[in-house]
């Protein structure tokens, strides 16, 4: 692990009072640095306990520029930070910079606040209409559906902003809080990926994704998965989009993976193959923030493991022969119309959701176990390939009777509604991952769970 990683791991658990590793600049060149609430002696003392003894020399700086994300405007900017004292640490051919500054909260404190607010907003529902809690450096960002949107840009309501800020400051003091607007619930249309006549093999709807990152983390791969929903961005019939699981695209589309390529290939009777490229179309990943997880820096905290890839051909759906707008019932006797969508917290623990699994060709019922469940990808090969670990943060956990199969990622998840409980459906999310413990060589499983990514973060409407 790097020297930055060791310090950040200590800080994550509030042993040290630093921020996460940040992108900094002296006005000439960029470099990585840590901001600290304390002097270097406390850091050196804790590093010595794990037999890390770096060489230390002063770094004479009065200020440093820190790359900061403005959640309200949705843009990056440089923030000037006044330095009290600075140090250069050298260890095992590595160089790290630590600057003591008047930061309000350390990484460990921010992680604790993030967990507490997520429980308060999303479990106890102490403040309505909040959809996301995110941390960056020594500030916290809250998304609210109270606001307005113009030209795909939103502005949060002033009263809602003040209410959220006052709530947080009352509990945590003078902390930097940014409030930004996210759209409320909007209708979606289900992708016809579960119709048998479109399948090339029994129980298999052939959707192949090729992705390649040319960014700071360089990697590429081909995977098979399931399409989830399709609709129109901002209700514009000229901008059709397909929504599915983001990890199927290798989590491209971030500041650390751009530029990137993401191509999608699938087959229908009218189109063999159909192809979508994010280069001649467009690609939007779900909300996310970068940080560290235990001793695995850097870490991509995925607030919704969903993404959409779109095309600029208004006739794309019809030309591909896609049948959409309905989802097949569990008994397969008839299809049910999708009349809209649900936000993440429109369901409660104990409620029932359904999954139409594209790969295993099953409709599976699940019971909501948790609305804020975090899951860490333990695949070491995936970490070595990409250079970062992914954490599905605060997702929805379902208890099921069927183990989700590889390739079911992206399958549509929805709620049955109506006078008889099954007259129509509302789109809810897409399958993100699975958990299960089974007897090898048998179909008997002790525990089966599905992790679901909500899809209420983008303004996608029925045409």
Image (cartoon, rainbow, N blue to C red):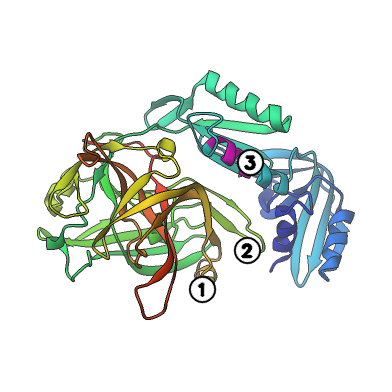
Whichever of callouts 1 and 3 sits on the residue coming sooner in the sequence is 3
Q: In the depicted view, which residue is nearer to us: 43 or 408? A: 408
Residue at mark 1 to residue at mark 3: CA–CA distance? 32 Å
> Given this view, does label 3 or label 2 mark the residue nearer the observer?
3
Magenta range is: 115-121
Badge number at residue 294:
none
Tell me if 198 is positioned left or right of 124 in this view: left
- Against 17, residue 140 (above or below) is above
| Local SS, label 2 | loop
Residue 432 point in image, percent of width and height: 41, 56
Q: Quadrant of the N terminus?
A: bottom right
Residue 35: give x, y in percent of width and height: 75, 48
Which callout, 1 or 3, points to the residue nearer the camera?
3
Query: What main secondary structure does the magenta stretch of the protein show?
Result: helix
Residue where numbered disc 3 is placed: 116
Is residue 340 a member of the stretch shown in magenta?
no
- Relative depth, front residue between 119 and 177: 119
Instruction: Judge whether 350 appears above or below 261 on screen.
Output: above
Return the residue at label 2: 296
Look at the image and tell me whether residue 228 can be seen. Answer: yes
Residue annotated with mark 1: 381
Extreme-top residue of the structure: 159
Cα distance, mark 2 to mark 1?
Answer: 13 Å
Residue 199, quarter of the rendered image: bottom left
Judge the density around disc 1: few (<14), some (14-19), many (≥20) Cα neighbours within 10 Å. few
Which residue is at 44% across, 33% downward? 182
Image coordinates for residue 266, horizontal then vertical, percent: 22, 62
Can residue 393 be seen from the camera position used here? no
Q: Is residue 409 left or right of residue 160?
A: left
Quarter of the image that includes the C terminus: top left
């Amino acid at each position: 692990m790097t020297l930055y990683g060791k310090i950040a791991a200590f800080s994550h658990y509030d042993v040290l009072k630093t921020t996460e590793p940040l992108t900094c600049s002296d006005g000439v060149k960029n470099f990585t640095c840590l901001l600290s609430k304390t002097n270097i002696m406390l850091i050196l003392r804790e590093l010595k306990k794990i037999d890390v003894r770096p060489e230390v020399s002063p770094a004479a700086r009065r200020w440093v520029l820190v790359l900061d994300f403005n959640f309200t405007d949705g843009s990056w900017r440089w923030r000037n930070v006044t330095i009290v004292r600075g140090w250069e640490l050298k260890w095992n051919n590595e160089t790290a910079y630590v600057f003591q500054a008047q930061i309000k909260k350390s990484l460990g404190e921010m992680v604790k606040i993030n967990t507490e607010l997520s429980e308060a907003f999303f479990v106890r529902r102490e403040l309505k209409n909040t959809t996301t809690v995110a941390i960056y450096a020594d500030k916290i960002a809250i998304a609210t559906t109270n606001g307005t949107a113009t030209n795909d840009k939103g502005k949060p309501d002033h009263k809602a902003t003040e209410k959220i800020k006052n709530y947080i400051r009352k509990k945590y003091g003078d902390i930097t809080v940014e409030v930004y607007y996210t759209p409320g619930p909007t209708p979606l249309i289900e992708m016809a990926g579960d119709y048998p006549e479109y399948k090339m093999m029994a129980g298999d709807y052939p959707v192949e994704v090729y992705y390649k990152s040319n960014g700071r983390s360089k990697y590429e791969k081909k995977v098979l998965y399931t399409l989830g929903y399709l609709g129109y961005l901002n209700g514009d019939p000229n901008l059709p989009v397909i929504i599915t699981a983001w990890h199927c695209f290798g989590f491209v589309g971030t500041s650390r993976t751009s530029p990137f390529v993401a191509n999608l290939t699938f087959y229908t009777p009218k189109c063999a193959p159909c192809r979508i490229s994010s280069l001649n179309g467009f690609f939007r990943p779900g909300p996310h923030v970068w940080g560290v997880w235990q001793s695995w820096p850097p870490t991509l905290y995925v607030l919704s493991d969903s993404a959409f890839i779109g095309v600029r051909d208004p006739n794309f759906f019809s030309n591909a022969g896609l049948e959409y707008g309905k989802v097949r019932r569990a008994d397969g006797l008839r299809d049910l119309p999708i009349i809209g969508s649900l936000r993440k917290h429109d369901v409660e623990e104990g409620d029932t959701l359904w999954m139409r699994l594209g790969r295993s060709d099953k409709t599976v019922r699940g019971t909501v176990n948790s609305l804020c469940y975090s899951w860490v990808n333990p695949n070491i090969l995936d970490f070595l390939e990409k250079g970062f670990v992914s954490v599905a943060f605060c997702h929805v956990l379902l208890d099921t009777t069927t183990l989700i199969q590889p390739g079911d990622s992206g399958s549509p998840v929805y709620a049955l509604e109506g006078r008889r409980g099954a007259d129509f459906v509302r789109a809810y999310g897409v399958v993100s991952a699975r958990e299960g413990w089974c007897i090898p060589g048998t179909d008997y499983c002790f525990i089966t769970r599905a992790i679901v990514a909500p899809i209420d973060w983008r303004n996608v409407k029925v045409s």
